[in-house]
Image (cartoon, coloured by chain):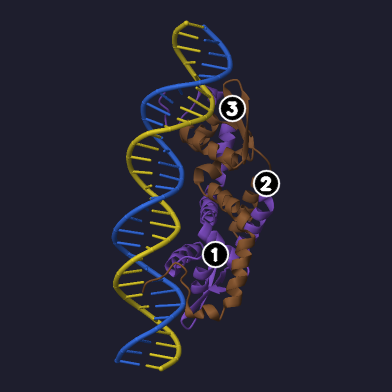
Chain colours: A purple, B brown, C blue, D yellow
Amino acid sequence: MKQTSHDSCDRFLVNADSVRAAKRHLDQTRERLFELTETFRILGDPTRLKIILVLKEQELCVCDLASILDVTRSAVSHQLRQLKNLRLVKFRRDGKVTHYSLKDSHIAILVETAMEHIHE
Amino acid sequence: MKQTSHDSCDRFLVNADSVRAAKRHLDQTRERLFELTETFRILGDPTRLKIILVLKEQELCVCDLASILDVTRSAVSHQLRQLKNLRLVKFRRDGKVTHYSLKDSHIAILVETAMEHIHE
DNA sequence: TTAACAGTTGAGCAACTGTTCACCTGACAA
DNA sequence: TTGTCAGGTGAACAGTTGCTCAACTGTTAA
């Protein structure tokens, strides 16, 4: 059976109020929804999550991050750019070396909350 | 310049202790790290996150979810399977209709924590 | 100047992912 | 039985993504 994009069903009219309420509820959080998804998406990659986890403990340079995660400096740099774009990390130049650290504690708190709630 | 997989640099020996400590720290959370990443990855998709957000408020059937999210029932069903696999949602058959709801409050708390910490 | 090094960047590619489509199952009503 | 509806499923496709490679910038030391 062909399923249309709207995909309304016979039950639609029965639950019309609930559905409308849910649509309204989603619409109200629409602005925040994008950055919320982005934040989770960024943390949903093993390399990036590991970067956050180790930066949560100490400031580190790209070279050390590459050594710890066992990937190339290039790979780390690419991922750090994404973390910079989302303003999750900050950096400090010191001669040839660039030291990275978490921009604020919000992301660390989020990861810790997730860890607490995962092994239920 | 060729970057090896291990990508050790001259600074390696200087920070050897920090690097080793970070590696140990990562290794200790290794078991939990997979499910942690999976949880964030699942929430990092707009369709799945919206499903969680509306199920947080009320129990809903596939048909209504499709109507609310404006996608096909098939798309909703595919995503619900992933949420079932991660044990984030539960369902209740009632004749032809399957009602979905959140399995427990952990995921809702996690999403709420994220919302609080995002618009800092 | 020159060489070495830390880090960045864009292109390319292989792997993954979310959606749609078509078809199927199971429940219910006629 | 037959038709209809809610929902599930696999194949296929288009779009995305994370990595590697090669080349580049900027800094430091010889």
Label 2 to label 1, Cα distance in Å?
24 Å
| Residue at position x 53%, y 53% in the image | A44
Tag 3 and tag 1, C-beta contact below 8 Å: no
Which numbered disc flags the more N-terminal residue, 3 or 2? 3
Quadrant occupied by the N terminus of chain B: bottom left
Residue A58 can be seen, yes or no: no
- Indicate the chain on which mark 2 is placed: B
| Residue at position x 50%, y 25% in the image | A9
Out of A27 and B57, give the one closest to the viewer. Answer: B57
Label 3 to label 1, Cα distance in Å?
40 Å
Residue at image mark 3 = B98
Which percent across, then down, holds residue C21? Answer: 36, 30
Image quarter for residue A18? Answer: top right
Residue at image mark 2 = B106
Q: Secondary structure at mark 1?
A: helix
Q: Is residue B8 left or right of residue D15?
A: right
Q: Secondary structure at mark 3?
A: strand
